[in-house]
Amino acid sequence: MSGRIREDRSEFGVLFVPGFAEQQPDTAIASFAGAVYRWLFRWESMPQWAGSPPVLSEAVFSGASGGDGPAHLTLAVPLLLSTGERDARWLLAESSWADLFTPPRFLGVARWIWKVSTCLLVLQFVIPMRRHWCRARRTAKPWRRRLADRLIALCYLVPMAVAAMASVVLSLALLALAVMEKLPIPRIDQAVRWVAVRISAVLGDSYMLAHCPVQFAAMRTQVARDLRWLQDRCEKVAVVAHSQGAAVAHQVLKDGGCRPGSLRAFVTVGQGISKLHLLQRMDWDPQVYRAAWWSRLLVTAGLFFAGLPALGLLAGHWARATIVKPVVSMPFSVLLPFAGFIMIAIGVRVAIWALRGDLGQDLALPDAGFSWSDYYASADPVSNGPLITRSGSGQAPRQNPAAPGQVKLQPDSCNQVYNSASLLFDHNRYLRNQDQLLSRLLNDLVAAAYGDSTSRPVIVRDADLIEVGQRRHRLILWLITARMLSVGLAAELWWVNAGPLLKSPMNRLLQLFTPGAGMDDGLARLLAAMLITAAAYAALVVGWRIREGYVVRRFFRTAKRLGATAQQDLGEPASQARKEAPSAAVS
Protein backbone atom coordinates (compact mmCIF):
# COMPACT_ATOMS: atom_id res chain seq x y z
CA MET A 1 0.00 0.00 0.00
CA SER A 2 1.35 3.43 -0.96
CA GLY A 3 0.32 6.84 0.27
CA ARG A 4 -0.64 6.51 3.93
CA ILE A 5 1.03 3.79 5.96
CA ARG A 6 -1.82 3.85 8.49
CA GLU A 7 -4.99 5.85 8.79
CA ASP A 8 -3.45 8.45 11.10
CA ARG A 9 0.09 8.67 9.67
CA SER A 10 1.43 9.89 6.31
CA GLU A 11 4.29 8.14 4.61
CA PHE A 12 6.44 11.28 4.33
CA GLY A 13 6.50 14.80 5.74
CA VAL A 14 8.55 17.90 4.90
CA LEU A 15 9.12 20.72 7.38
CA PHE A 16 10.14 23.98 5.71
CA VAL A 17 12.01 26.35 8.03
CA PRO A 18 12.19 29.81 6.38
CA GLY A 19 14.50 32.72 7.05
CA PHE A 20 13.64 36.11 8.43
CA ALA A 21 12.50 37.40 5.05
CA GLU A 22 9.21 35.50 5.49
CA GLN A 23 8.07 37.22 8.66
CA GLN A 24 4.34 36.71 8.22
CA PRO A 25 2.88 33.32 9.21
CA ASP A 26 1.69 31.02 6.41
CA THR A 27 3.73 32.83 3.73
CA ALA A 28 6.59 30.32 3.84
CA ILE A 29 4.38 27.27 3.28
CA ALA A 30 2.63 29.09 0.44
CA SER A 31 5.90 29.90 -1.35
CA PHE A 32 7.49 26.48 -0.75
CA ALA A 33 4.42 24.37 -1.57
CA GLY A 34 3.66 26.59 -4.56
CA ALA A 35 7.18 26.14 -5.95
CA VAL A 36 7.05 22.34 -5.50
CA TYR A 37 3.54 22.21 -7.01
CA ARG A 38 4.58 24.20 -10.09
CA TRP A 39 7.61 21.97 -10.63
CA LEU A 40 5.59 18.75 -10.35
CA PHE A 41 2.83 20.14 -12.55
CA ARG A 42 5.29 21.00 -15.33
CA TRP A 43 7.11 17.69 -14.89
CA GLU A 44 3.96 15.53 -14.96
CA SER A 45 2.32 17.43 -17.83
CA MET A 46 5.05 16.65 -20.35
CA PRO A 47 4.13 14.21 -23.18
CA GLN A 48 6.80 11.70 -22.11
CA TRP A 49 4.95 11.08 -18.86
CA ALA A 50 1.36 12.21 -19.02
CA GLY A 51 0.60 11.41 -15.40
CA SER A 52 -2.05 12.90 -13.17
CA PRO A 53 -1.42 16.49 -12.04
CA PRO A 54 -0.50 17.10 -8.40
CA VAL A 55 -3.28 17.90 -5.96
CA LEU A 56 -3.06 20.13 -2.88
CA SER A 57 -5.63 19.48 -0.17
CA GLU A 58 -6.32 19.64 3.56
CA ALA A 59 -4.66 23.05 3.86
CA VAL A 60 -4.71 24.46 7.39
CA PHE A 61 -3.20 27.83 8.22
CA SER A 62 -1.71 28.52 11.62
CA GLY A 63 -4.17 31.37 12.23
CA ALA A 64 -7.25 29.26 11.45
CA SER A 65 -9.62 28.57 14.31
CA GLY A 66 -9.06 25.13 15.73
CA GLY A 67 -5.91 24.63 13.64
CA ASP A 68 -3.66 21.86 14.92
CA GLY A 69 0.04 22.68 14.93
CA PRO A 70 1.82 24.74 12.28
CA ALA A 71 0.48 25.67 8.87
CA HIS A 72 0.37 22.56 6.72
CA LEU A 73 -1.22 20.94 3.68
CA THR A 74 -1.22 17.60 1.84
CA LEU A 75 0.37 17.03 -1.56
CA ALA A 76 -0.76 14.02 -3.61
CA VAL A 77 0.89 13.16 -6.93
CA PRO A 78 1.98 10.02 -8.82
CA LEU A 79 5.76 9.96 -9.16
CA LEU A 80 7.72 8.02 -11.77
CA LEU A 81 11.02 7.23 -10.06
CA SER A 82 14.09 5.26 -10.99
CA THR A 83 12.67 2.38 -8.91
CA GLY A 84 9.16 2.54 -10.36
CA GLU A 85 5.90 4.41 -9.95
CA ARG A 86 4.75 5.65 -6.54
CA ASP A 87 1.52 7.34 -5.52
CA ALA A 88 3.06 9.95 -3.26
CA ARG A 89 1.08 11.59 -0.48
CA TRP A 90 3.23 14.06 1.43
CA LEU A 91 2.45 16.31 4.37
CA LEU A 92 4.09 19.74 3.94
CA ALA A 93 4.40 22.06 6.94
CA GLU A 94 6.20 25.25 7.89
CA SER A 95 7.87 26.37 11.09
CA SER A 96 7.42 30.11 11.56
CA TRP A 97 8.51 32.29 14.47
CA ALA A 98 7.15 35.66 13.34
CA ASP A 99 5.64 36.32 16.76
CA LEU A 100 9.03 35.71 18.42
CA PHE A 101 10.92 38.35 16.42
CA THR A 102 11.30 41.80 17.98
CA PRO A 103 13.11 44.48 15.95
CA PRO A 104 16.16 45.84 17.82
CA ARG A 105 16.42 49.47 18.80
CA PHE A 106 18.56 51.97 16.93
CA LEU A 107 21.41 51.99 19.41
CA GLY A 108 21.50 48.20 19.38
CA VAL A 109 21.64 48.08 15.58
CA ALA A 110 24.33 50.78 15.46
CA ARG A 111 26.41 48.91 18.00
CA TRP A 112 25.81 45.69 16.07
CA ILE A 113 27.02 47.19 12.78
CA TRP A 114 30.16 48.56 14.40
CA LYS A 115 30.91 45.26 16.13
CA VAL A 116 30.54 43.07 13.04
CA SER A 117 32.05 45.44 10.47
CA THR A 118 35.38 43.61 10.60
CA CYS A 119 33.66 40.23 10.60
CA LEU A 120 31.66 41.24 7.54
CA LEU A 121 34.91 42.17 5.82
CA VAL A 122 36.34 38.76 6.62
CA LEU A 123 33.22 36.82 5.69
CA GLN A 124 32.00 38.66 2.64
CA PHE A 125 35.23 39.56 0.91
CA VAL A 126 38.34 37.99 2.41
CA ILE A 127 36.98 34.44 2.27
CA PRO A 128 35.92 34.48 -1.42
CA MET A 129 39.07 36.44 -2.30
CA ARG A 130 41.20 33.74 -0.69
CA ARG A 131 39.12 31.05 -2.43
CA HIS A 132 39.77 32.56 -5.88
CA TRP A 133 43.45 33.05 -5.07
CA CYS A 134 43.79 29.38 -4.11
CA ARG A 135 42.03 28.35 -7.33
CA ALA A 136 44.58 30.36 -9.29
CA ARG A 137 47.36 28.18 -7.85
CA ARG A 138 45.97 24.99 -9.34
CA THR A 139 48.30 24.04 -12.14
CA ALA A 140 45.76 21.68 -13.69
CA LYS A 141 43.56 24.60 -14.72
CA PRO A 142 44.18 26.55 -17.97
CA TRP A 143 46.23 29.72 -17.62
CA ARG A 144 43.26 31.85 -18.69
CA ARG A 145 41.14 30.53 -15.81
CA ARG A 146 43.99 31.06 -13.35
CA LEU A 147 44.49 34.61 -14.57
CA ALA A 148 40.77 35.29 -14.27
CA ASP A 149 40.77 33.96 -10.70
CA ARG A 150 43.66 36.26 -9.76
CA LEU A 151 41.92 39.29 -11.27
CA ILE A 152 38.67 38.46 -9.46
CA ALA A 153 40.58 38.08 -6.19
CA LEU A 154 42.14 41.53 -6.59
CA CYS A 155 38.78 43.06 -7.50
CA TYR A 156 37.47 42.18 -4.03
CA LEU A 157 39.66 44.96 -2.58
CA VAL A 158 37.29 47.62 -3.97
CA PRO A 159 34.04 46.40 -2.35
CA MET A 160 36.00 45.65 0.82
CA ALA A 161 36.99 49.31 1.17
CA VAL A 162 33.47 50.49 0.31
CA ALA A 163 31.92 48.12 2.86
CA ALA A 164 34.31 49.24 5.59
CA MET A 165 33.45 52.90 5.08
CA ALA A 166 29.72 52.19 4.69
CA SER A 167 29.58 50.26 7.98
CA VAL A 168 31.00 53.21 9.96
CA VAL A 169 28.85 55.79 8.14
CA LEU A 170 25.72 53.70 8.69
CA SER A 171 26.51 53.37 12.39
CA LEU A 172 26.84 57.16 12.70
CA ALA A 173 23.57 57.66 10.80
CA LEU A 174 21.74 55.26 13.11
CA LEU A 175 23.21 57.03 16.12
CA ALA A 176 21.90 60.36 14.78
CA LEU A 177 18.45 58.84 14.22
CA ALA A 178 18.45 57.47 17.76
CA VAL A 179 19.05 61.03 19.03
CA MET A 180 16.31 62.40 16.76
CA GLU A 181 13.85 59.90 18.18
CA LYS A 182 14.17 61.60 21.59
CA LEU A 183 13.40 65.07 20.23
CA PRO A 184 9.89 66.50 20.91
CA ILE A 185 9.04 66.82 17.22
CA PRO A 186 5.57 65.72 16.02
CA ARG A 187 5.56 62.45 14.05
CA ILE A 188 9.36 62.20 14.14
CA ASP A 189 9.13 59.09 16.30
CA GLN A 190 6.85 57.38 13.75
CA ALA A 191 9.23 58.12 10.89
CA VAL A 192 12.23 56.93 12.87
CA ARG A 193 10.41 53.75 13.93
CA TRP A 194 9.53 53.04 10.28
CA VAL A 195 13.21 53.28 9.35
CA ALA A 196 14.12 51.01 12.29
CA VAL A 197 11.75 48.30 11.11
CA ARG A 198 13.15 48.42 7.57
CA ILE A 199 16.74 48.20 8.82
CA SER A 200 15.87 45.39 11.20
CA ALA A 201 14.36 43.37 8.36
CA VAL A 202 17.82 43.31 6.76
CA LEU A 203 20.18 43.29 9.73
CA GLY A 204 18.01 42.21 12.64
CA ASP A 205 18.13 38.47 11.89
CA SER A 206 21.78 37.92 12.70
CA TYR A 207 21.55 40.48 15.51
CA MET A 208 18.84 38.45 17.24
CA LEU A 209 20.42 35.05 16.71
CA ALA A 210 23.94 35.99 17.76
CA HIS A 211 23.28 38.48 20.57
CA CYS A 212 19.86 37.60 22.01
CA PRO A 213 20.16 34.08 23.44
CA VAL A 214 16.66 34.18 24.97
CA GLN A 215 14.93 34.83 21.66
CA PHE A 216 17.21 32.35 19.91
CA ALA A 217 16.18 29.72 22.46
CA ALA A 218 12.50 30.54 21.84
CA MET A 219 13.01 30.12 18.10
CA ARG A 220 14.70 26.76 18.58
CA THR A 221 11.88 25.63 20.86
CA GLN A 222 9.31 26.55 18.21
CA VAL A 223 11.13 24.65 15.46
CA ALA A 224 11.62 21.59 17.69
CA ARG A 225 7.91 21.62 18.59
CA ASP A 226 6.87 21.80 14.92
CA LEU A 227 9.31 19.03 14.00
CA ARG A 228 7.93 16.73 16.69
CA TRP A 229 4.39 17.55 15.52
CA LEU A 230 5.31 16.42 12.02
CA GLN A 231 7.10 13.30 13.27
CA ASP A 232 3.98 12.27 15.17
CA ARG A 233 2.06 12.22 11.88
CA CYS A 234 4.62 10.86 9.40
CA GLU A 235 6.71 7.71 9.15
CA LYS A 236 9.59 9.60 7.53
CA VAL A 237 10.47 13.29 7.75
CA ALA A 238 12.79 15.73 5.97
CA VAL A 239 13.74 19.27 7.00
CA VAL A 240 14.31 21.94 4.34
CA ALA A 241 15.72 25.19 5.77
CA HIS A 242 16.57 28.52 4.15
CA SER A 243 18.86 31.36 5.28
CA GLN A 244 18.89 31.93 9.06
CA GLY A 245 16.18 29.31 9.37
CA ALA A 246 18.92 26.83 8.49
CA ALA A 247 20.95 28.11 11.44
CA VAL A 248 18.00 27.63 13.80
CA ALA A 249 17.19 24.15 12.46
CA HIS A 250 20.86 23.16 12.59
CA GLN A 251 21.07 24.07 16.26
CA VAL A 252 17.86 22.13 16.96
CA LEU A 253 19.32 19.00 15.35
CA LYS A 254 22.63 19.54 17.13
CA ASP A 255 20.85 19.74 20.49
CA GLY A 256 18.90 16.55 19.76
CA GLY A 257 15.55 18.30 19.29
CA CYS A 258 14.20 15.59 16.98
CA ARG A 259 13.30 11.96 17.54
CA PRO A 260 15.94 9.72 15.96
CA GLY A 261 14.97 7.29 13.25
CA SER A 262 12.22 9.10 11.35
CA LEU A 263 14.34 12.06 10.20
CA ARG A 264 15.86 11.05 6.84
CA ALA A 265 17.18 14.27 5.26
CA PHE A 266 18.34 17.75 6.21
CA VAL A 267 18.55 20.17 3.27
CA THR A 268 19.99 23.67 3.69
CA VAL A 269 19.45 26.33 1.03
CA GLY A 270 21.38 29.62 1.22
CA GLN A 271 22.36 28.75 4.79
CA GLY A 272 23.53 31.24 7.40
CA ILE A 273 25.03 28.61 9.72
CA SER A 274 28.72 29.38 9.30
CA LYS A 275 28.18 33.14 9.62
CA LEU A 276 26.14 32.72 12.79
CA HIS A 277 28.77 30.52 14.41
CA LEU A 278 31.53 33.01 13.65
CA LEU A 279 29.51 35.92 15.03
CA GLN A 280 28.69 33.97 18.17
CA ARG A 281 32.37 33.22 18.69
CA MET A 282 33.18 36.92 18.40
CA ASP A 283 30.78 37.70 21.27
CA TRP A 284 30.84 34.65 23.52
CA ASP A 285 34.30 33.09 23.10
CA PRO A 286 36.65 34.74 25.67
CA GLN A 287 39.74 34.17 23.51
CA VAL A 288 38.16 35.54 20.35
CA TYR A 289 36.37 38.43 22.06
CA ARG A 290 39.56 40.35 22.90
CA ALA A 291 41.00 39.89 19.42
CA ALA A 292 37.69 40.98 17.88
CA TRP A 293 37.71 44.12 20.05
CA TRP A 294 41.22 45.07 18.90
CA SER A 295 40.27 44.29 15.31
CA ARG A 296 37.24 46.59 15.43
CA LEU A 297 39.31 49.35 17.05
CA LEU A 298 42.02 49.12 14.38
CA VAL A 299 39.52 49.11 11.51
CA THR A 300 37.61 52.10 12.90
CA ALA A 301 40.81 54.08 13.51
CA GLY A 302 42.11 53.15 10.07
CA LEU A 303 38.93 54.39 8.43
CA PHE A 304 39.17 57.62 10.38
CA PHE A 305 42.75 58.30 9.30
CA ALA A 306 42.07 57.28 5.69
CA GLY A 307 39.11 59.65 5.51
CA LEU A 308 40.74 62.66 7.18
CA PRO A 309 42.15 64.19 3.95
CA ALA A 310 38.78 63.97 2.20
CA LEU A 311 37.02 65.36 5.29
CA GLY A 312 39.53 68.19 5.52
CA LEU A 313 39.09 69.01 1.82
CA LEU A 314 35.32 69.24 2.21
CA ALA A 315 35.61 71.33 5.37
CA GLY A 316 38.05 73.69 3.66
CA HIS A 317 35.78 74.02 0.64
CA TRP A 318 32.67 74.77 2.68
CA ALA A 319 34.04 76.73 5.65
CA ARG A 320 37.10 78.28 3.99
CA ALA A 321 38.98 77.38 7.17
CA THR A 322 42.77 77.52 7.29
CA ILE A 323 43.04 75.03 10.15
CA VAL A 324 42.41 72.10 7.82
CA LYS A 325 45.15 73.02 5.34
CA PRO A 326 47.83 70.89 7.06
CA VAL A 327 45.55 67.88 6.78
CA VAL A 328 45.03 68.17 3.03
CA SER A 329 48.56 69.29 2.19
CA MET A 330 51.49 67.07 1.32
CA PRO A 331 52.73 64.78 2.79
CA PHE A 332 49.78 64.31 5.17
CA SER A 333 47.31 63.73 2.32
CA VAL A 334 49.37 60.66 1.36
CA LEU A 335 50.63 59.46 4.73
CA LEU A 336 47.26 59.51 6.50
CA PRO A 337 45.42 57.25 3.96
CA PHE A 338 48.47 54.98 3.79
CA ALA A 339 48.54 54.64 7.59
CA GLY A 340 44.78 54.11 7.63
CA PHE A 341 44.90 51.28 5.11
CA ILE A 342 47.75 49.65 7.04
CA MET A 343 45.66 49.75 10.22
CA ILE A 344 42.67 48.28 8.39
CA ALA A 345 44.83 45.46 7.01
CA ILE A 346 46.21 44.72 10.48
CA GLY A 347 42.70 44.69 11.94
CA VAL A 348 41.43 42.28 9.31
CA ARG A 349 44.50 40.09 9.87
CA VAL A 350 43.81 40.01 13.61
CA ALA A 351 40.22 38.94 12.95
CA ILE A 352 41.31 36.19 10.56
CA TRP A 353 43.87 34.92 13.07
CA ALA A 354 41.29 34.86 15.86
CA LEU A 355 38.69 33.02 13.72
CA ARG A 356 41.12 30.57 12.16
CA GLY A 357 39.73 27.59 14.13
CA ASP A 358 38.19 24.61 12.39
CA LEU A 359 34.54 25.42 11.77
CA GLY A 360 33.83 21.81 10.81
CA GLN A 361 33.70 20.70 14.45
CA ASP A 362 31.08 23.37 15.19
CA LEU A 363 29.00 22.37 12.17
CA ALA A 364 29.11 18.62 12.77
CA LEU A 365 25.82 17.01 13.81
CA PRO A 366 25.23 13.78 15.71
CA ASP A 367 24.75 11.15 13.01
CA ALA A 368 21.21 9.85 13.57
CA GLY A 369 20.81 8.13 10.21
CA PHE A 370 19.91 11.09 8.00
CA SER A 371 21.68 12.79 5.08
CA TRP A 372 22.64 16.46 4.80
CA SER A 373 22.73 18.36 1.49
CA ASP A 374 23.69 22.01 1.12
CA TYR A 375 22.95 24.38 -1.78
CA TYR A 376 24.37 27.86 -2.29
CA ALA A 377 23.97 30.39 -5.09
CA SER A 378 27.02 31.74 -6.88
CA ALA A 379 26.61 35.30 -5.53
CA ASP A 380 24.56 34.73 -2.37
CA PRO A 381 26.12 36.97 0.34
CA VAL A 382 24.53 34.98 3.18
CA SER A 383 25.89 31.52 2.37
CA ASN A 384 29.03 33.13 0.88
CA GLY A 385 30.21 29.96 -0.82
CA PRO A 386 30.19 26.30 0.25
CA LEU A 387 29.44 25.41 3.84
CA ILE A 388 32.62 23.33 4.18
CA THR A 389 35.79 23.06 2.13
CA ARG A 390 35.84 20.15 -0.25
CA SER A 391 38.55 17.55 -0.08
CA GLY A 392 40.95 16.84 -2.87
CA SER A 393 38.62 14.31 -4.43
CA GLY A 394 35.97 16.96 -4.88
CA GLN A 395 33.61 15.53 -2.27
CA ALA A 396 32.96 16.79 1.22
CA PRO A 397 33.97 14.44 3.98
CA ARG A 398 31.10 12.36 5.30
CA GLN A 399 32.38 11.91 8.82
CA ASN A 400 34.73 13.73 11.16
CA PRO A 401 36.87 12.38 13.95
CA ALA A 402 34.93 12.54 17.20
CA ALA A 403 34.90 11.12 20.65
CA PRO A 404 34.80 7.33 20.99
CA GLY A 405 31.34 5.97 20.29
CA GLN A 406 30.23 9.14 18.49
CA VAL A 407 29.85 9.73 14.77
CA LYS A 408 29.65 13.29 13.48
CA LEU A 409 27.75 14.28 10.35
CA GLN A 410 28.71 16.99 7.87
CA PRO A 411 27.08 17.82 4.52
CA ASP A 412 27.33 14.98 2.02
CA SER A 413 27.75 17.58 -0.72
CA CYS A 414 27.84 21.35 -1.16
CA ASN A 415 26.24 22.13 -4.52
CA GLN A 416 26.51 25.45 -6.32
CA VAL A 417 23.48 26.70 -8.23
CA TYR A 418 23.10 29.75 -10.45
CA ASN A 419 20.23 32.16 -9.79
CA SER A 420 21.05 35.63 -11.14
CA ALA A 421 24.66 36.26 -9.98
CA SER A 422 23.47 39.24 -7.95
CA LEU A 423 24.43 40.19 -4.40
CA LEU A 424 21.00 41.77 -3.97
CA PHE A 425 18.71 39.10 -5.43
CA ASP A 426 20.49 35.74 -5.33
CA HIS A 427 19.53 34.97 -1.74
CA ASN A 428 15.76 35.17 -2.30
CA ARG A 429 15.57 33.53 -5.73
CA TYR A 430 16.21 29.89 -4.84
CA LEU A 431 12.61 28.74 -5.17
CA ARG A 432 12.38 30.45 -8.57
CA ASN A 433 15.24 28.28 -9.87
CA GLN A 434 12.91 25.59 -11.19
CA ASP A 435 15.23 23.66 -13.45
CA GLN A 436 18.39 23.39 -11.31
CA LEU A 437 17.67 23.92 -7.61
CA LEU A 438 14.17 22.43 -7.34
CA SER A 439 15.15 19.42 -9.44
CA ARG A 440 17.96 18.60 -7.02
CA LEU A 441 15.73 19.33 -4.04
CA LEU A 442 13.05 16.93 -5.31
CA ASN A 443 15.72 14.28 -5.79
CA ASP A 444 16.75 14.69 -2.14
CA LEU A 445 13.16 14.46 -0.93
CA VAL A 446 12.39 11.40 -3.05
CA ALA A 447 15.54 9.66 -1.80
CA ALA A 448 14.55 10.44 1.80
CA ALA A 449 10.98 9.21 1.30
CA TYR A 450 11.61 5.98 -0.62
CA GLY A 451 15.32 5.20 -0.31
CA ASP A 452 17.15 2.86 1.99
CA SER A 453 20.69 1.69 2.64
CA THR A 454 20.85 -0.17 -0.69
CA SER A 455 19.07 2.17 -3.12
CA ARG A 456 18.61 5.90 -3.65
CA PRO A 457 15.71 6.56 -6.01
CA VAL A 458 15.66 9.81 -7.96
CA ILE A 459 13.13 11.61 -10.10
CA VAL A 460 15.60 13.48 -12.36
CA ARG A 461 18.62 11.86 -13.98
CA ASP A 462 22.11 13.03 -13.01
CA ALA A 463 22.94 13.60 -16.69
CA ASP A 464 20.04 16.06 -17.03
CA LEU A 465 21.11 17.88 -13.87
CA ILE A 466 24.66 18.24 -15.16
CA GLU A 467 23.40 19.54 -18.50
CA VAL A 468 21.07 22.12 -16.96
CA GLY A 469 23.89 23.25 -14.66
CA GLN A 470 26.08 23.93 -17.69
CA ARG A 471 23.29 25.86 -19.39
CA ARG A 472 22.70 27.90 -16.23
CA HIS A 473 26.43 28.66 -16.02
CA ARG A 474 26.44 29.97 -19.58
CA LEU A 475 23.43 32.15 -18.72
CA ILE A 476 25.29 33.66 -15.79
CA LEU A 477 28.34 34.39 -17.95
CA TRP A 478 26.03 36.17 -20.38
CA LEU A 479 24.57 38.30 -17.59
CA ILE A 480 28.01 39.19 -16.20
CA THR A 481 29.12 40.16 -19.69
CA ALA A 482 26.04 42.39 -20.01
CA ARG A 483 26.97 44.17 -16.79
CA MET A 484 30.53 44.72 -17.93
CA LEU A 485 29.31 46.10 -21.26
CA SER A 486 26.98 48.46 -19.40
CA VAL A 487 29.84 49.80 -17.30
CA GLY A 488 31.93 50.25 -20.44
CA LEU A 489 29.03 52.04 -22.16
CA ALA A 490 28.67 54.45 -19.23
CA ALA A 491 32.40 55.21 -19.30
CA GLU A 492 32.32 55.71 -23.07
CA LEU A 493 29.36 58.07 -22.87
CA TRP A 494 31.11 60.07 -20.19
CA TRP A 495 34.34 60.14 -22.20
CA VAL A 496 32.80 61.28 -25.50
CA ASN A 497 30.60 63.83 -23.67
CA ALA A 498 27.18 62.99 -25.09
CA GLY A 499 25.54 65.40 -22.65
CA PRO A 500 25.30 68.48 -24.88
CA LEU A 501 23.45 66.46 -27.52
CA LEU A 502 20.68 65.76 -25.01
CA LYS A 503 20.89 68.99 -23.04
CA SER A 504 18.06 70.71 -24.93
CA PRO A 505 15.57 67.78 -24.70
CA MET A 506 16.42 67.29 -21.04
CA ASN A 507 15.88 70.95 -20.27
CA ARG A 508 12.46 70.83 -21.95
CA LEU A 509 11.59 67.74 -19.93
CA LEU A 510 12.82 69.41 -16.72
CA GLN A 511 10.74 72.53 -17.39
CA LEU A 512 7.58 70.41 -17.45
CA PHE A 513 8.10 69.74 -13.75
CA THR A 514 10.04 72.86 -12.68
CA PRO A 515 9.35 75.86 -14.95
CA GLY A 516 12.28 78.18 -15.39
CA ALA A 517 14.85 75.63 -14.25
CA GLY A 518 17.86 74.87 -16.40
CA MET A 519 20.55 72.26 -16.64
CA ASP A 520 24.25 72.79 -17.13
CA ASP A 521 26.48 70.68 -19.38
CA GLY A 522 27.95 68.64 -16.53
CA LEU A 523 24.58 67.56 -15.18
CA ALA A 524 23.23 66.86 -18.66
CA ARG A 525 26.31 64.79 -19.38
CA LEU A 526 25.85 62.74 -16.22
CA LEU A 527 22.13 62.19 -16.74
CA ALA A 528 22.64 61.25 -20.39
CA ALA A 529 25.18 58.59 -19.48
CA MET A 530 22.96 57.23 -16.70
CA LEU A 531 19.76 57.13 -18.77
CA ILE A 532 21.33 55.56 -21.85
CA THR A 533 23.20 52.99 -19.77
CA ALA A 534 20.09 52.12 -17.77
CA ALA A 535 18.02 51.68 -20.93
CA ALA A 536 20.69 49.51 -22.56
CA TYR A 537 21.12 47.35 -19.46
CA ALA A 538 17.34 46.96 -19.07
CA ALA A 539 17.16 45.72 -22.66
CA LEU A 540 19.96 43.23 -21.99
CA VAL A 541 18.26 41.99 -18.81
CA VAL A 542 14.97 41.50 -20.69
CA GLY A 543 16.83 39.42 -23.26
CA TRP A 544 18.46 37.44 -20.44
CA ARG A 545 15.08 36.77 -18.81
CA ILE A 546 13.67 35.52 -22.10
CA ARG A 547 16.65 33.23 -22.53
CA GLU A 548 16.29 31.97 -18.95
CA GLY A 549 12.65 31.08 -19.59
CA TYR A 550 13.70 29.18 -22.71
CA VAL A 551 16.32 27.23 -20.74
CA VAL A 552 13.73 26.25 -18.12
CA ARG A 553 11.21 25.16 -20.76
CA ARG A 554 13.92 23.20 -22.55
CA PHE A 555 14.74 21.30 -19.38
CA PHE A 556 11.16 20.20 -18.80
CA ARG A 557 10.75 19.35 -22.47
CA THR A 558 13.94 17.33 -23.01
CA ALA A 559 14.71 15.73 -19.63
CA LYS A 560 14.00 11.99 -19.74
CA ARG A 561 11.57 10.56 -17.24
CA LEU A 562 12.99 7.73 -15.18
CA GLY A 563 11.41 4.35 -14.70
CA ALA A 564 10.13 4.10 -18.27
CA THR A 565 13.40 5.08 -19.96
CA ALA A 566 14.62 1.56 -20.62
CA GLN A 567 11.30 0.42 -22.08
CA GLN A 568 11.04 3.49 -24.28
CA ASP A 569 14.52 2.87 -25.64
CA LEU A 570 13.34 -0.60 -26.73
CA GLY A 571 10.41 0.88 -28.61
CA GLU A 572 7.65 0.29 -26.06
CA PRO A 573 5.13 3.09 -25.51
CA ALA A 574 5.29 5.10 -22.32
CA SER A 575 1.88 3.88 -21.16
CA GLN A 576 3.01 0.25 -21.38
CA ALA A 577 6.20 1.11 -19.51
CA ARG A 578 4.21 2.73 -16.71
CA LYS A 579 1.91 -0.26 -16.56
CA GLU A 580 4.78 -2.71 -16.09
CA ALA A 581 6.88 -0.52 -13.80
CA PRO A 582 7.25 -2.31 -10.47
CA SER A 583 5.87 -0.62 -7.42
CA ALA A 584 8.30 -0.49 -4.53
CA ALA A 585 7.18 -2.21 -1.35
CA VAL A 586 6.25 -0.05 1.58
CA SER A 587 8.08 -0.85 4.73
Image: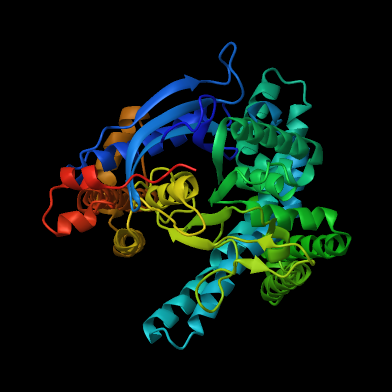
Q: Residue extending furthest left?
A: 571
| Residue 65: image location, x then y, percent | 58, 11
55 and 379: which one is in front?
55
For residue 279, above or below residue 4: below
Q: Residue extending furthest bottom?
A: 139
Residue at 29% from the left image edge and 35% from the top image edge: 509
| Residue 25: image location, x then y, percent | 57, 26
Would residue 317 be found to the left or right of residue 485 on screen?
Answer: right
Q: Is residue 28 visible?
A: no
| Residue 447: image location, x then y, percent | 45, 51
| Residue 539: image location, x then y, percent | 25, 49
Would residue 352 be found to the left or right of residue 129 on screen?
Answer: right
Q: Please state, as top left, top right, bottom left or bottom right, where the N terminus lies in the image.
A: top left
Q: Quadrant of residue 43?
A: top left
Q: Is residue 232 visible?
A: yes
Would residue 96 be found to the left or right of residue 419 on screen?
Answer: right
Residue at 41% from the left image edge and 47% from the top image edge: 442
Q: How many marks?
A: 0
351 and 418: which one is in front?
418
Residue at 83% from the left image edge and 65% from the top image edge: 291
For residue 362, above or below residue 448: below
Would residue 577 be found to the left or right of residue 75 on screen?
Answer: left
